[in-house]
Amino acid sequence: MLSIKDLTVNVGDKQILKGLNLEVKAGEVHAIMGPNGAGKSTLSHVLSGKAGYTITGGSVTYEGQELTELDPEMRAREGVFLAFQYPVEIPGVSNIYLLKAALNAIRKHRGADEIDAMDFLVWVKDKVRLLDMDEKFLYRAVNEGFSGGEKKRNEILQMAVMEPKLCILDETDSGLDIDALKIVAHGVNSLRSENRAFVMITHYQRLLDYIKPDFVHVLADGKIVKSGGAELALELEEKGYSWLEKQEVA
Amino acid sequence: MNAQLASHYSSDYPEYAANLSGQSVAWLKTLRSEALATFSSTGFPTLREEEWRYTNVSAIEKKRFKPVEKTGTINENLLKTYRLDDAWTMVFVDGYFSPEHSHTSGLSDEVELSSIADILETQAEKLKPYLGQAVSNDEHNFVAFNTAWFNDGVFLNIPAKQVLSKPIQLLHIVSQPDALVTTRNIIVAGKHSESEIIETFIGENAYLNAAVNEVFVEENAALTLYKLQSESTKSYHFGGTYVKQQPNSRFNHNSFSFGALLARNDVHTDLETASECSLNGLYLGVKRQHIDNHTRINHNKPHGISREFYKGILDNRARGVFQGRVVVVEDAQKTDSEMNNRNLLLSNDAEVDTKPQLEIYADDVKCAHGVTVGQLEEKSIFYLQSRGVDEETARNVLTFAFANEMVDKVSIDSLKTLLETELLKSLPIEL
């Protein structure tokens, strides 16, 4: 589904990603872990098409096409979803408006008709319950005045509505208490399917207790320095990132 | 042209005056001749005047707009679009009251709602306590001009304790090219009354609309005045609303200005003890439109409350002006005043001049003001794009949301729908 080869990315003159390789197949859940400043957020931003990054080398192939050549909205319509580390507050735009606009943009892209308003409401309320959210959230402005946990749940709600193929979760666990974390994890787990892949970017192993990854990669200084199964996360938790850095030097 | 007159409008006046309403009313003739003298000495305001420094109206002098005869031909579709179904409506065509387009049936007989031209024929004395009392000719020369030239308008007198079950719409439509349209409205909200009024200005062709409202809000009365101004992009608009508020009264003004070629909106209110006012505004300028909003709130007595919130959106080469002046006199202790003006510039060539002015002479008051001028946030645009919304739509959605905050304050459903439609004309998105 996603194939990243020798990807190098600059922000200004500074190289952040220094030859990153990653293969993700449908149905897989990958965790990318790493210390602060390793390039985790840069990776999620580059995949979603945020401005301000210069791709200096390598390729990102998604479903057979070069992802980095697509506008952000086209990536979303093609099934790439980013759950933001810092979801943006948008006063004056209601959640339900955004959800409907997002869904219809995808349907239009696929050549389907716009969804009937009543059908949409029934369907979206079902998703709201999945995230254990109050229906009132639908009518509030996007993320405005939401708590940290509410914002993250709202991201997963959008993901549930848009039904993407590739879900990138950028530090979705940060700022969540244990109850909110369980709810978010439940939402994510219920969306797992053989046609869908997840890339979870996280600093801590905590989230992985609830969303079990198939693969764990360690990103350090702009490269994947170690890959393994779920057990690698536990090892990292125990020994810390300095363990790897030392290993690398040795 | 007479060399002593600063404006050719003054030279044309004698010819026009013979047809003016109320010619047989002596006190009005005096008022008009004083106004004419004031106007003729300097003509229309110039950039040298502090309160006109951002708005150049000299084109009006060059244009030679002329009063027109009554006419029957108007764009019925345009009228239909803006006439509200759930309001009583007084329609003015090219500045003349048009009974056939108006409907006021069902309005209580106790409420006086008449054409000023009609009143001046038979009951001119009714106007005497009000005309020229909420604003004087010295205010600036558009007011003096209006006093000398006005031919029609409404006299609305809401008696004490009346609560109007529907709003009253005063709809001004202009159709004839080069028309000079001058209307004067007198609105009296009696003690403990509650009412909503919607002024609507629409039109086609190039013309000048110079309208003045004198508003009297008696003790404990509540009056909400809406203004929707969406005129031909060749036209010039001056609209001034001057309000006298008695103790414990409430006055709300909500201005929605989609502009003309050049539009100037004045709202001035004088607050007595423990009276409240709320002035809200939205101005949206595109192409080469110029929209100037000028407000003044005079806190003359203690315990007054004023809230002011204006939002502007300027695109292309449009220019916006916001001048908000709050004066708190020495006697007006415990005044509570807030003013806010936020502007969104959608193009590099758009411009806004914003100038909040607080003049506070009392020492125990709470006064705050804030001004912002900015652009759409890139992170918000990206967030919407990441949800499949294309960039242009994302910009329109965010701009619509910025404007819609003001539309949301409207409590009349039909007006709210009309305003949303008006916004969507400039910002095409699917709701």
Image: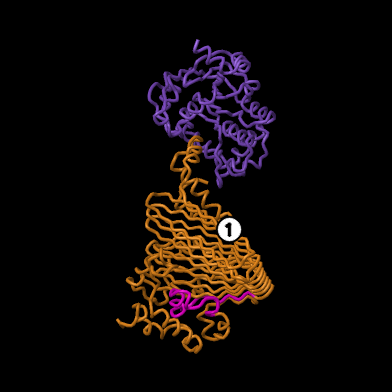
Chain colours: A purple, B orange
Q: Residue B79 placed where, x, y %?
A: 47, 64
Q: Name the foreground residue: B421 vs A148.
A: A148
Residue segment shown in magenta: B131-158
Q: Is residue A174 visible?
A: yes
- The residue beneath circle 1 is B368
Q: Residue B331 placed where, x, y %?
A: 63, 71
Question: The disc labelled 1 sits on which kind of residue?
Answer: Ala
| Chain for disc number 1 | B
Q: Residue B111 placed where, x, y %?
A: 63, 75
Q: Name the foreground residue: A74 vs A4.
A: A4
Q: Residue A6 placed where, x, y %?
A: 42, 18
State which quadrant residue A214 falls in.
top right
Task: Judge whether B76 appears above or below B19 on screen.
Answer: above
State which quadrant residue B416 falls in.
bottom right
Task: Judge whether A214 appears above or below B261 on screen.
Answer: above
Task: Judge whether B408 appears above or below A173 on screen.
Answer: below
Instruction: Name the element at disc 1.
Output: strand
Q: Residue A180 lies in magenta, yes or no?
A: no
Q: Residue at x 53, y 77 (%)?
A: B115
Task: Judge whether B248 appears above or below A89 on screen.
Answer: below
* Badge 1 density bin: few <14, some 14–19, many ≥20, Cα 10 Å: few
Instruction: Say left or right for B242 vs A185.
Output: left
**Extreme residue in the front direction:** B363
Q: Residue B149 lies in magenta, yes or no?
A: yes
Q: Is residue A196 visible?
A: no
Q: Name the foreground residue: B401 vs B207.
A: B401
* Numbered marks: total: 1
**Extreme residue in the top direction:** A250
